[in-house]
Amino acid sequence: MKKTGMLVLLVIAIAAAGWWWWSSKGKPAEPQYRTVAVDRGDISAQVSANGTLNPVTLVNVGTQVSGTVRRIYADFNQQVKAGQILAELDPALFQAALAQSSANLANAQAQLGLAEANATRMQTLFRQEYVSRQELDQSQAAHEQAMAQVRVARAQVTRDQTNLGFTVIRSPVDGTVINRQVDVGQTVAASFQTPTLFQIGKDLTQMQIDSTVSEADIGLVKVGQPVKFLVDAFPDAEYSGAVRQVRLNAKTEQNVVTYNVVVDVANPDLALMPGMTANLRVEVETRPNVLRVPTAALRFRPQVDSAAERGSTPRGAAVHVLGSDGKPVRVAVRTGISDKAHTEIVSGKLKPGDAVIMADLKAQKDNNSSMPRGRLF
């Protein structure tokens, strides 16, 4: 019985070993490379940028005279017409100045009448030889000086009337009040620079995006290219526009050179508001049904064992396919436009269905296994 039991155990062990050997032999080897098939599809090259929505025409309404705000007739978001009164400054000082200049004008006109009468009288007396030529010339000069004083006084009256008119602030355009920066009782001073009292957007149904594009991408942006953009206020809605202007004035911030690209946007429902941040994509070029590969396949490089092999690697764009011996084979290609995910293949020995290598799975597995694990103190 003891010998029989040992024989049974031996047979079971042999059977288990045979089953393990056959099962391991029949199991397919794990693939070393991850591949993706070459296909055809549409590629749209895009340039991404950020910008701010603004009215196409934003007018800063100020004042040319100083004074205290007495009344305000317009408020935020109000629709106004050209010439409509927005605010009034206290006109007391300007009315007094106008009254004084008007009195000066009346005085100058009276002096002119007297000088004119004297000149006429002196001409009569000169013809009768009762006065000399010098006295006649002096009377004519006094008459001309009186005329000049009248012109000076009249100009002063005009200036004071104009300044009095400036105390009434009017809208220069039809539009919407975007911002009001004054309140009743506030004093505004126009001594050194014109203060801004109101900001008026001329037509909010037509907006523009003032965006910044880096110098690496600005060469791809052209006037008329279509633009798609999103705003945080409406994340599910995509808006469209078109490039209107690429401004030549460059800005440098922290050694980064950018250019201002202006995009025209239609806003018929007034949903887009001034100041919103727009995340936009300029559609530089679209090519339909082209041969394409994943962009990551162009970055794949197989591992080499020696420095000589590394130095002999040819340069230029290329992808790798599996050869008959299961090793990567380099295929040189010429690339076209890219949308970051896919890149167009213009020429090269590739056709739809070819499997290009994306990654070395064995190298990734070895790298992951060599990483230190556990807590670090």
Image (cartoon, grey):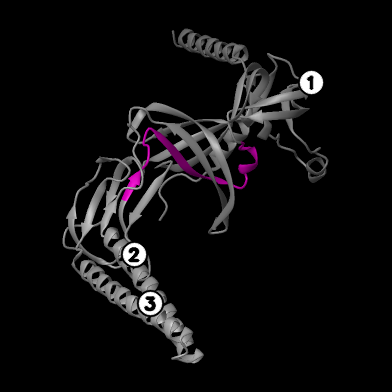
Residue 32, visible in the rendered structure: no
Residue range highlighted in magenta = 199-222
Disc number placed over residue 158 in the picture, else none = 2
Q: Residue furthest front?
A: 128
Name the spot of residue 25 as percent of width and height, x first: 62, 14
Tell me what residue is drawn at x 21 percent, y 56 percent: 88
Q: CA distance from mark 1 to mark 3?
A: 105 Å
Give amino acid for label 1: Lys
Say which quarter of the image contains residue 41.
Answer: top right
- Relative horizontal placement of residue 76, taking residue 54 as reference (left or right): left
Q: CA distance from mark 2 to mark 3?
A: 24 Å
Residue at the spot of label 3: 116
Pick whichever of labels 2 and 3 is earlier in the sequence: 3
The crowding category of the residue bearing disc 2, from other C-alpha atoms within 10 Å (few below 14, some 14 to 19, many at least 20), is: some
Eyeballing the image, is 92 above or below 42?
Answer: below
Pick whichever of labels 1 and 2 is earlier in the sequence: 2
Say which quarter of the image contains residue 196.
Answer: bottom left
Q: Total label count?
A: 3
